[in-house]
């Protein structure tokens, strides 16, 4: 049974100021996410990655609820499986991230475990 659904959309242009600011990047990304970010080749890819991860983490907090004590972006890690599909480090949780022009959107569904 579904226990929560979350959605978030962001304008990825706002993440341009993050690109060369390691302090901001470290607040948003886990170590593994930061390694992926560093390997992105273009400004567009970097903004999409940051916007997608931000939207996904916000969507997770909406779906899961903050009453469970998870309040940091570091509590949630979003990597990709071998096929490139995003996956989240929380059991019984499903995620989708999309980008279009200047926007990134994420949906998260949490099932009771």
Image: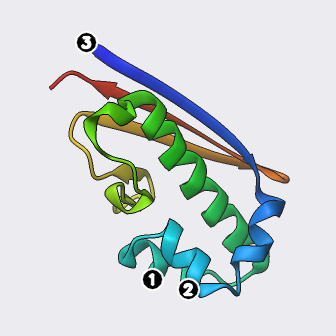
Q: Residue at x 83, y 62 (%)?
A: 13
Q: Which mark is residue 17?
A: none
Farthest residue, direction left: 113
Residue that numbered label 2 is attached to = 38
Q: Quadrant of residue 22?
A: bottom right
Q: Is residue 64 above or below residue 57?
A: above
Q: Is residue 16 above or below residue 55?
A: below
Quarter of the figure with the C terminus: top left
Instruction: Tell me the distance, in whole angstroms, between the alpha carbons under discs 2 and 3.
Output: 38 Å
Residue that numbered label 3 is attached to = 1
Mark 3 or mark 1: whose residue is earlier in sequence: 3
Classed neighbour count for the residue bearing mark 1: other residues with Cα under 10 Å, few (<14), some (14–19), many (≥20) = few
Asked whether the viewer can see residue 74, the reply is: yes
Classed neighbour count for the residue bearing mark 3: other residues with Cα under 10 Å, few (<14), some (14–19), many (≥20) = few
Quarter of the figure with the N terminus: top left
Asked whether the viewer can see residue 39, the reply is: no
Horizontal side of 38 relative to 110 (left or right) equals right
Instruction: Tell me the distance, in whole angstroms, between the alpha carbons under discs 2 and 1.
Output: 5 Å
Q: Which mark is residue 35?
A: 1
Specify how the rendered protein is coloured: rainbow
Secondary structure under tag 1 reads helix
Horizontal side of 3 relative to 49 (left or right) equals left
């Amino acid at each position: 049974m579904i226990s929560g659904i979350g959605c978030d959309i962001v304008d990825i242009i706002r993440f341009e100021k993050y690109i060369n600011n390691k302090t901001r990047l470290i607040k948003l990304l886990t170590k593994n996410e930061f390694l992926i970010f560093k390997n992105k080749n273009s400004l567009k890819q970097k903004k999409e990655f940051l916007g997608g991860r931000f939207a996904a983490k916000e969507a997770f907090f909406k779906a899961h609820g903050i009453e469970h004590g998870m309040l940091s972006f570091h509590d949630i890690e979003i990597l990709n499986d071998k096929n490139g599909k995003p996956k989240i480090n929380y059991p019984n949780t499903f995620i989708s991230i999309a980008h279009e022009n200047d926007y990134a959107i994420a949906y998260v569904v949490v099932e009771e475990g």
